[in-house]
Image: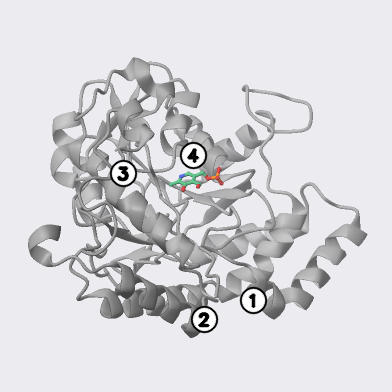
Amino acid sequence: MQVPPFDLTEQLHQLGEALEDAVLQVLRSGQYIGGATIARFEQQFAEAVGTPHAIGCNSGTDALVLALRGLGIGEGDEVITSSFSFFATAEAISAVGATPVFVDVEESTYLIDLDRIEAAITPATKAVMPVHLFGRPVDMERLGAIAAAHDLLLIEDCAQATGASWAGRPVGSWGDAGCFSFFPTKNLGGAGDGGAVTCRDPALAARIRELAVHGMPRRYLHTSLGYNSRLDAMQAAVLSVKLPHLAGWVEQRRQLATTYRSELADLQGLMLPAEGPSGHSWNQFVVRVPRCPSAEAGCGGGCVPSSDSATYGLPESCCRDWLKQALAEAGVNTIIYYPIPIHRQPAYAELGYGPGSLPITERLTAEVLSLPIFPELSAAQQATVTAVMRQLVTQPLSLAS
Ligand SMILES: Cc1ncc(COP(=O)(O)O)c(C=O)c1O
C-alpha cells in the first residue's frame, strides 16, 4: 500500500456533486470577479473566526502583505517573527519594506519562544507576527499581553491553522489582523490559491479591501498604490461548500494525531510532537528524528552528510533523511517542513544571521519529518504508517536521547 502525505481523492468523492454544482453555478452566472458568492463566503468565514470582518484575497501570502500594509507597517519598521515557518511569513514583511527579526522557537512546541520576544524589541519594532505552525496555536493571551505592554501590533499568521483556537477562541480573532491561506493542502483548502484577512476594526477592513483592489475606494479613483489580490468567485464557491465541514475535518485530524501519539509512544528513537492544547488543528503531525533511529540498518552514525547541511551551515540531517528514504521505500511518503530555516536562506543572507544564530530552529530543520495526516486518511493507511515506523525505528533510548 502506498500512503501519500496528502490526498484529496476521498474528499472529492464525498463532496463531488456539491462542489460541481457550486462551480457550475458560478460558471453559468458569468460573475467571476466580485459579487454575491464572495460576499457570502466572507461573511461565513468571518462568523467562523468570530470577527466582524473577513476580506478574501489571492493567497495567504497576500493576506499577510495586505494586513501589514493596512496596519501601516513599512520602510524602517521591524516585525518580530519565527524563522521556523514557510518562507512567505518573512517574505511578506520584506515585501512591504519592513525587516523581519527572527526569534528562536520553543523546543517542545516548535512555536515562537515567548520568553525571547522582549529581548528582540527595539525602537523600530512595530509588530509581532506569531505563526500558528502546523495548526498549533500560540498562547495568544500571553503574547497579547507582551504586545500590549510594548505597544506593538499583532498580526497572526494563521495559514496552517484554520479551525484552530486558543482558550476556546479561534486563531485570527486575537490579533489586530488574522491571515489565512486556502492553499489546497490547508485545513480549509480551495481549488487553487486563495486567502483571507480577518479583523475587528472596520476602518482597517476598508483599507485592506481597497489595497486588494489597486488602492481603489471607488471605481477608477486610486488613493494608494495597492495590488490586484482578489479571491475569485470559483474559489469562494468551493470554500463555501467546504467550510461547514471544517470543524469535523479538524476533529478527524485530532483523532489521527491521538492515534499516532499512542501507537508511536514507545518508539524511543523518535520524539513525538507535544500533546494538545485542545484547540490544536493538526495541519501537520511532525516528529523529530534526533539520532539514527535504526539499530540494524540506517546510518549507524556514519551516513553521508547531506549537501544542504554543508551548504547552509545547518546541523547534520542524515538520520532523519535516512528514515524518510526508508519510509518511502516501504510506501509511506512524508514531507520535511522545513529543511532550511528562513534566516539561513540565500535570499536573506544580507540580514546576517550566521550558522548557530537560532540553534533550536536550526536543529529542528535537521530533525523534523511530517507523517501523513489529512481527514480522510483511512485507519488502514494509518496502521501501515505506524507498522512501518515500528519496523524501522529500533534504536534504544540510550542511543536516541
Ligand atoms: C505559515 C505560512 N504562512 C504563509 C503561507 C502562504 O500562504 P499561500 O501559499 O496561500 O500564499 C503559508 C503557505 O504555505 C504558510 O504555511
- Depth check, front residue: 373 or 119: 373
Assign the C terminus to one quadrant of the image: bottom left
Q: Are marks 1 and 2 in contact (CB under 8 Å)?
A: yes
Pick the front one: 220 or 23: 23
Disc 3 marks which amino acid? Thr
Q: Mark 1 points at which residue?
A: 10
Query: Residue drawn at (76%, 56%), measured in percent from left and top?
Result: 234
Dot 2 lies on which element?
loop
Along the polypeptide, which appears first: circle 3 or circle 4? Answer: 4
Q: Would you place residue 316 above or below residue 36 in this image?
A: above
Q: How far apart are marks 3 and 2 (CA)?
A: 28 Å
Q: Are marks 1 and 3 in contact (CB under 8 Å)?
A: no
User: Which residue is located at x 55 percent, y 70 percent?
Assistant: 2
Which of pointers 2 and 4 lies earlier in the amino acid sequence? 4
On residue 362, the disc is none
Q: Nearer the viewer, mark 2 or mark 4?
A: 2
Residue 369 position within the rendered picture, expressed as x and y whole percent measured from the top left? 36, 56
Residue at horizontal 27%, vertical 28%? 313
For the residues labelled 3 and 4, the Cα–Cα distance comes to 24 Å
**Nearer the camera: disc 1 or disc 3:** 3
Q: Which mark is first along the chain, 4 or 1? A: 1
